[in-house]
Amino acid sequence: MRVYQENQRLVIADGNSRLWIDPWGENSLRVRMSAFPEMDGHDWALSEPVKPTDVEITFETVDNTDPWYAGQEYSHYHQQGTIARIKNGKITAVVNPEGWISYYNQKGEVLTEEYWRNRNRLNRFCVPINVGARELKKIMGTEDVELTARFEAYDDEKLFGMGQYQHRQLNKKGSTLELAHRNSQASVPFVVSSRGYGFFWNNPAIGTATFASNVTEWYAKRTRKLDYFITAGDTPAEIEAQYTLATGRTPMMPEFGLGYWQCKLRYRNQEELLEVAREHKRRGLPMDVIVVDFFHWTRQGDFRFEPRDWPDPDAMVKELKEMGIETVVSVWPTIDERSVNFGEMAEKGYLVGTDHGNPNHMTWMGNTIFYDATHPGAQKFVWEKCKENYYTKGIRIFWLDEAEPEYGNYDFENFRYYQGPAVQCSNVYPVGYAKGFFDGLKAEGETDIMSLVRCAWAGSQKYAVLTWSGDIYSSFRSMREQLQAGLSMGMAGIPWWTSDIGGFLGGQIDDPAFRELLCRWFAWGCFCPVFRMHGERSPWYEREQEFINNVRQLTSGQPNEVWSFGEEVYEILSSYLFVRERLRPYVRRIMQEASDIGAPPMRPLFYDFPQDKAAWDVEDSYMFGPDLLVSPVMEAGVTERNVYLPAGCRWTDAYTGKEYEGGQRVTVPAPIGIIPVMMREGTNYEIYKK
């Protein structure tokens, strides 16, 4: 093994294997390793230019008398070795004589270190089980490897981020997470540690991340190289800022994103949608966006309105704009074999392939194949069709659904993309999906860009994605899971996030239990990055099948407007439309901070109060920007809420006006129409009108 310097890079070479440690922006390092002579050239999410920094690389010759290795167990060794160090600001990587790496902050404290249990000379663990920190097992006949990277586990460590998973645990310590996308699951493999570092697994391969009590382990089933980014900071905010500089920051949210979005499954025709918008205006209710959901098209993959039900979309969009409402139109990546575009896309290689078996990926409402969003030509083709049939009619916002993509069978080892086998790169699919529309809109001169997507990976944020949490169930349990999902997405660098208010599946509009859930969820939605109503609302209308020119049409759920659930519910829901409007300047401000410094609008308490140890344990409240502490009611039948107030300032209950000292738990009133919101000392927002 040789350790040497190449310019600002530290290199560990062993036979044909190479490991590179490079400075990658302030206080940050990028580590890459190949089992082959050439390093794979994919940068994946680390494609942003980073600020040059001053780096110190040093080498020190040591023997068994060095304090690191001192001890009787090494007394029979009299061999020398080299310790190499690369320091970039607040982070230092130390390579021991065996080639294993430890990471330190500027105070000399260990942040994390590789996990190795080898019986080698000068090995301080000196155990015979022969487990290494980096395991790149070559896959025969390829230049791919099965990859495992191991790091030490720490009992006191808390870990946050990783994207969107459907469970309650905000702190991911103790979790095993699939590194794969599914409907309602978005894997974004960046984690912030309470020990003062952030770690990004820059690998879109299918795999797992395990944060166990005995080891932290990252696994990729099939890949070309080890590639990760590690950054050190004194606060979570500093760590987040450095990570988002490396992977890209979101643009400034367009003005229409700050208000209320109306949506349901599904407005079946043009007149139905327009009448909802008109009724909002007749009632004097604010609305910024209304959504034309899926199956407004003739066939999947046509990317155009069905002319019978949407006879004049130009006039529809014009009337909505005159009311101050933007139109969103749903786009699916599924291409029906009978679509007008199927033949050309198949001929040009724009469809996701299979290595064996039936090429159909989904058979719901037609035999369909996903278009290949990793293919630059396919990205451009789909955008051009949407430009022709939607953009030219005045539509600027696209709902990029099925962005995982949602295979009927998640057989990742069977599918093949332009970028390679799906098992190797599937997690970049939503990035390419969003990029195609972002690039197309930008080329048309648009600056206020936003796409609603059902999935994201690292780097998606720079393509102006608003991620929502997928087809979730209508229950308080699901609501509680969405709270951690939204916070985890924000900590993973995806700041624009929302959920289907009330849940997507199973909400009966006449059920008192659902109405209670909806009131609680709607109030919480007002304090999410985007305030958006959606849901299928059972039971569905017209369960009999309807056809147009032998093409089956999709029916619709029950009404889903704020006036659809009775007068008592209407009074509560409509009041929050105006709360959001009064908060609009504040929401605009925190969205600017997301764009400027990478601060997630919705974040755990420890983000703003890292010195308060108790704040690191709070998982049922969050900060909405720096000034508002929000505590959603996530149980049925309760009328008060226990809230932890971080130390260091006083807090005022926005509902009662009562002031409290920080650093304590308090119980505050939470009747059905009220979500507890505490205002930080020095602020006074008109949330509840007296």
Image: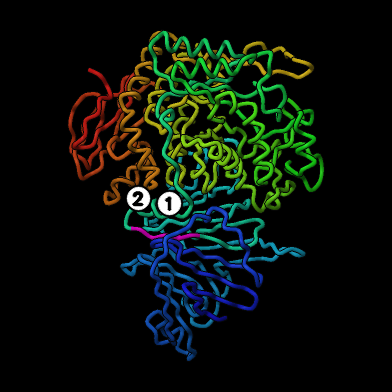
Decide which of 458, 395 is in the foreground and name it.
395
Membership of 24 in magenta stretch: no
Q: Amino acid at mark 1?
A: Leu
Q: Which mark is residue 649?
A: none
Task: Point out the image quarter for the N terminus.
Answer: bottom right
Under circle 1, the secondary element is strand
From this view, report whether residue 359 is shown above or below residue 176.
above
Tell me where residue 681 appears, x and y as whole percent: 19, 37
Write the residue at 57% across / 44% down.
431
Write the residue at 26% across / 28% down.
668
Decide which of 478, 459 is in the foreground and name it.
459
From this view, report whether residue 638 is shown above or below residue 463.
above
Q: Are marks 1 and 2 in contact (CB under 8 Å)?
A: no
Our reading of the magenta stretch's main secondary structure is strand
Write the residue at 58% across / 77% down.
13
> Looking at this rendering, what residue extends furthest in the right direction?
357
The residue where tag 1 is placed is 159
Q: Which mark is residue 237?
A: 2
Decide which of 553, 356 is in the foreground and name it.
553
Tell me where residue 428 appears, x and y as whole percent: 60, 47
Q: Amino acid at mark 2?
A: Ala
**Front tag of 1 and 2:** 2
Mark positioned earlier in the residue sequence (1 or 2): 1
Under circle 2, the secondary element is helix
Decide which of 222, 548 is in the foreground and name it.
548
Q: Is residue 158 left or right of residue 341?
A: left
From this view, report whether residue 92 is shown above or below residue 187.
below
Tell me where residue 191 appears, x and y as whole percent: 45, 52
Q: Residues within 10 Å of mark 1 (few under 14, many from 20)?
A: many
Residues at marks 1 and 2, CA–CA distance in whole angstroms:
14 Å
The part of the chain drawn in magenta is 229-233
